[in-house]
Amino acid sequence: MSLRASLSPSILAIVSLSACVPAVGEDMARAEFKPVYGGIQTVLLDGDLVNFHVSMKGARDRSDVDTYARCAAAQYALIRGASFTRHVRTSIAQTGGNWRGDAVYTISKELPRGSATIDAEVTVRDCGEQGIPTI
């Protein structure tokens, strides 16, 4: 007799559905992620080159700070009538639970060269869906 034949239909249903449920650790990580966004400062460096300083508490890692800066850059581009940004560099520092990002982006109306280009409108919409504030 096979294992499948010996299991009741209700046990098979439970086992099948368990594959659809996220792991407990994933649910806890999502539930515990409650960032506090501390603000965005922008500095126009030269023409289309812009520096963004962001701060936040409760980041899970560097990528949360990087995403916050990317959201700020995308919104800034839209405010300036541009459709795209291109990531130049980001420096991130953490002191205790305080995270700071220092990011530089170019903004442009046309799709810039390079692999780190960002469609500003799509990015701002995505940031809003994730609850990440922009400028």
Image (cartoon, rainbow, N blue to C red):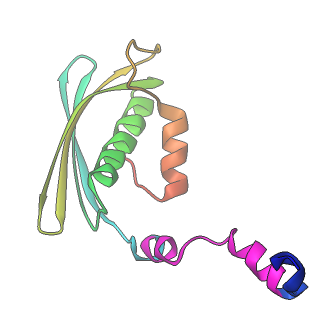
Q: Is residue 18 visible?
A: yes
In this image, 1 relative to 87: left or right? right
Report the number of discs: 0
Q: Is residue 81 visible?
A: no
Q: Is 113 covered by the magenta stretch?
A: no
Q: Residue 14 location in percent, x, y?
A: 77, 82
Magenta highlight: main SS: helix
Query: In the depicted view, which residue is nearer to us: 125 or 91?
Result: 91
Residue drawn at point x = 38 percent, y = 71 percent: 34
Query: In the depicted view, which residue is nearer to us: 77 or 32?
Result: 32
Q: Quadrant of residue 9?
A: bottom right
Residue drawn at point x = 55 percent, y = 36 percent: 122
Q: Which residues are magenta?
A: 11-29
Q: Is 16 covered by the magenta stretch?
A: yes
Q: Quadrant of residue 18?
A: bottom right
Q: Residue 35 location in percent, x, y?
A: 34, 67
Residue drawn at point x = 17 percent, y = 53 percent: 100
In this image, 46 relative to 86: left or right? left
In this image, 61 relative to 95: left or right? right
Q: Residue 29 location in percent, x, y?
A: 43, 72
Q: Residue 103 location in percent, x, y?
A: 22, 37
Q: Quadrant of the N terminus?
A: bottom right
Query: In the depicted view, which residue is nearer to us: 108 or 112?
Result: 112
Q: Is residue 56 above or below residue 30?
A: above
Q: Quadrant of residue 115?
A: top left
* Farthest-out residue, front: 1
Residue drawn at point x = 41 percent, y = 14 percent: 112
Q: Is residue 119 above or below residue 90?
A: above
